[in-house]
Amino acid sequence: NIVNLHLGDHHLPLHLAPHDLPLLETFRGDAQTAASILPGRPVHGLALSGREPSEVSLIAFAHTRLPIRRLDLGSISITPMQLLTISKHRKGYSASQLLSQVS
């Protein structure tokens, strides 16, 4: 079973069945791909790369079975408004905590 998934060159959503990747803990890749994989899975580590994430993608990250404890935004361009969107939809994160992770 796959626990860590890195899809650095894939920038489109994946169409997976809900029972696919039941043990996935970490994902590294594009925000649009992550938004199609993370909901309903026990992902607690996320590293985004590629294009700037959409608000829809950012909201999808709030639907993992476990809280995302490690969020790496260092490889993407992110705006203060996007940080507010993440903090609004992800329990346990404030915008200031996210800013300290990005710096």
Image (spheres, rainbow, N blue to C red):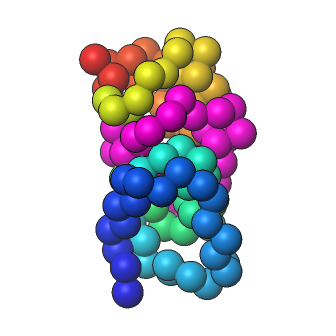
In the rendered image, residue 64, in percent from the top left (x then y), is placed at 57, 58
- Residue projecting furthest to the right: 56
Q: Tell me, yes or no, whether the highlighted magenta stretch contains residue 15.
A: no
Relative to residue 8, is residue 81 depicted above or below? Answer: above
Q: Is residue 14 left or right of residue 29?
A: right
Q: Is residue 75 left or right of residue 11?
A: left
Residue in view at x 44 percent, y 22 percent: 77
Given residues 77 and 4, the one toward you in this image is 77
**Residue 7 % position (x, y):** 40, 59
The answer to whether residue 89 is seen in the rendering is: no
Query: Left or right: where does residue 73 sit relative to residue 12?
Result: left
Q: Residue furthest front?
A: 9
Q: Residue at x 67, y 80 (%)?
A: 17
**In the picture, which quadrant includes the C terminus?**
top left
The residue nearer to you, when weighing 34 against 95, is 34
Where does the N terminus fall, quadrant-wise?
bottom left
Tell me if residue 67 is in the magenta stretch. yes
Find residue 68 and report its horizontal and vertical position in percent: 45, 49
Quarter residue 72 falls in = top left
Residue 100 visible in the current orientation: yes
The relative height of residue 49 versus residue 9 in the rendered view (above or below) is above
The image quarter in which residue 76 lies: top left
Q: Which residues are magenta?
A: 46-72
Image quadrant assignment for residue 56: top right
Q: Nearer the viewer, residue 64 or 20?
A: 20
Image location of residue 61, percent across then percent down = 58, 47
* Residue sitting farthest toward the left: 103
Query: Which residue is at the front of the view, 18 or 53?
Result: 53
Q: Residue at x 56, y 82 (%)?
A: 20
Image point (48%, 67%), residue name: 42
Instruction: Specify whether 6 is left or right of 51.
Output: left
* In the depicted structure, whether residue 64 falls above or below residue 23: above
